[in-house]
Image (cartoon, rainbow, N blue to C red):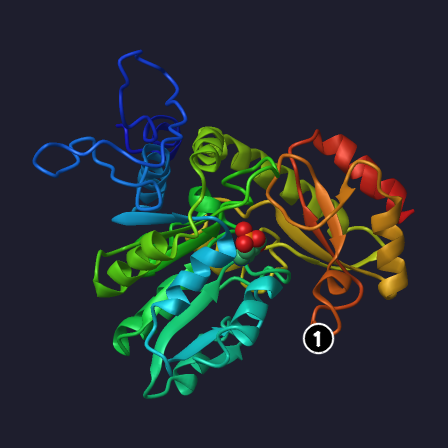
Amino acid sequence: MDNRTETIAIHAGNLYQPSTHDITPPINLSTTFLRNEDGGYSGGHMYSRISNPNRNALEHTLTLLEGGQEACAFSSGNTAGMSIFQALPPGSHVIAPDDMYWGFKKQLQTIFNHILEFDFIDMTVIENISGFIKKNTALIWIETPSNPLLKVTDIVAVSEIARQYQLILACDSTFASPCLQQPITLGADIVMHSSTKYIGGHSDVLGGVLITAKKNACWEKIRNIQQTGGAVPSPFDCYLLSRSIKTLPYRMKGHNENAIALANYLEDHPAIERVYYPGLESHPQYKIARKQMKGFGGMLSVLVKGGADEAHKVVNKVHLFAQATSLGGVESLIEHRYSVEGPDSKTPQNLIRISAGLEHIDDLIADIDQALN
Ligand SMILES: *Cc1c(COP(=O)(O)O)cnc(C)c1O
């Protein structure tokens, strides 16, 4: 079988075979491509904003990893998501989660607030969702697991509501990566990733991607926004992402392992009030996470006993964890989330968000341990 995740990750991006028989596809920097006498483009490309070999390879791999029909790669996660909202008819109503990546919520509230209407609700209470659906509702946006509270949304349950009311269901699956959850196979119409995170995995490339379940009219609009709007990743960025995807399934296994060990350790620590990690049985949506995820991911948040001061002390005392925003890289990161999100944030002041990297788990625990004691 060559449709298993690890195998797709390594082979799907090797789309074309140059005469030099490269094992690794080269970076194709050409912005323009030769036209035939009959006016066609037998090489398959015309102009690199519209398509180029490295982007095609990346999009093809992600399509297969997510079990979708097609993918569009963008220059950032936020632009990927933005393209979905640009594709909605003006005046549409959108239901979005109360806990979601703040930079994306900021985009909705400061750029799309003039064009679209929003309700931000608790998506973990499925019974609530139908009550918010209006005549002009067009889209349900979910993010699971969510940032920074690691709330898990039941994708199958929400997709049934979306189908009943003929709404588009889009899922920001960044925290899960394509290896731990496949929202399309669970009923979502469009999956979004910030490929800056796990897909890139080395904190050195910015990118985003959408994968669709169906090539329908909405997707054609999104494809046009990508190709004509032009917020596309460079061939080099696409190369870096394709290179990173080869190790994604194994990196995710390591992230899962380290995060669960950190979560277990922190849950028992007297200086910690609460741990948010979907792989802990104490997590309110543990059962849903187990049902829809193949692993629980590398992200966890904790409440430090005390307040903002105690939380700041911990992030300033660690040595191995870098105090920085973002996530999904091979190196462990830690941050005081409230001060990143700013005064409008609903994130608890004593919350620390951890991106568990791939260092040895004993070193990570020893570092947190000395910072907490
Ligand atoms: C980082 C992130 C985004 C935004 O992606 P960028 O690549 O930074 O534009 C969106 N959603 C989630 C869950 C993220 O973590």
Give the residue type at disc 1: Asp
Q: Is residue 8 left or right of residue 95?
A: left
Q: Is residue 130 left or right of residue 271?
A: left
On the image, the x and y values in percent for residue 11 come to 34, 26
**The furthest residue to the left:** 38
Report the number of numbered marks: 1
Q: Residue at x 36, y 38 (%)?
A: 55
Residue 281 in which image quadrant: bottom right
Q: Residue at x 63, y 44 (%)?
A: 260
**The furthest residue to the top:** 20
Q: Callout 1: helix, strand or loop?
A: loop
Q: Nearer the viewer, residue 256 or 26?
A: 26
Tell me which image quadrant ligand 1 sits in. bottom right
Q: Is residue 343 left or right of residue 25?
A: right
Task: Tell me if residue 52 comes above or below residue 316 in the rendering.
Answer: above
Q: Is residue 203 left or right of residue 295?
A: right
Q: Residue at x 77, y 40 (%)?
A: 321
- Per the image, the residue denoted by label 1 is 344
On the image, the x and y values in percent for residue 21 come to 30, 12
Q: Residue at x 50, y 44 (%)?
A: 295
Task: Tell me if residue 204 comes above or below residue 76 in the rendering.
Answer: above
Q: Nearer the viewer, residue 167 or 296?
A: 167
Circle 1: is it few (<14), some (14-19), or many (20+) Cα within 10 Å?
Answer: few
In which quadrant of the rendered image does the N terminus lie?
A: top left
Q: Nearer the viewer, residue 242 or 370?
A: 242
Residue 170 in which image quadrant: bottom left
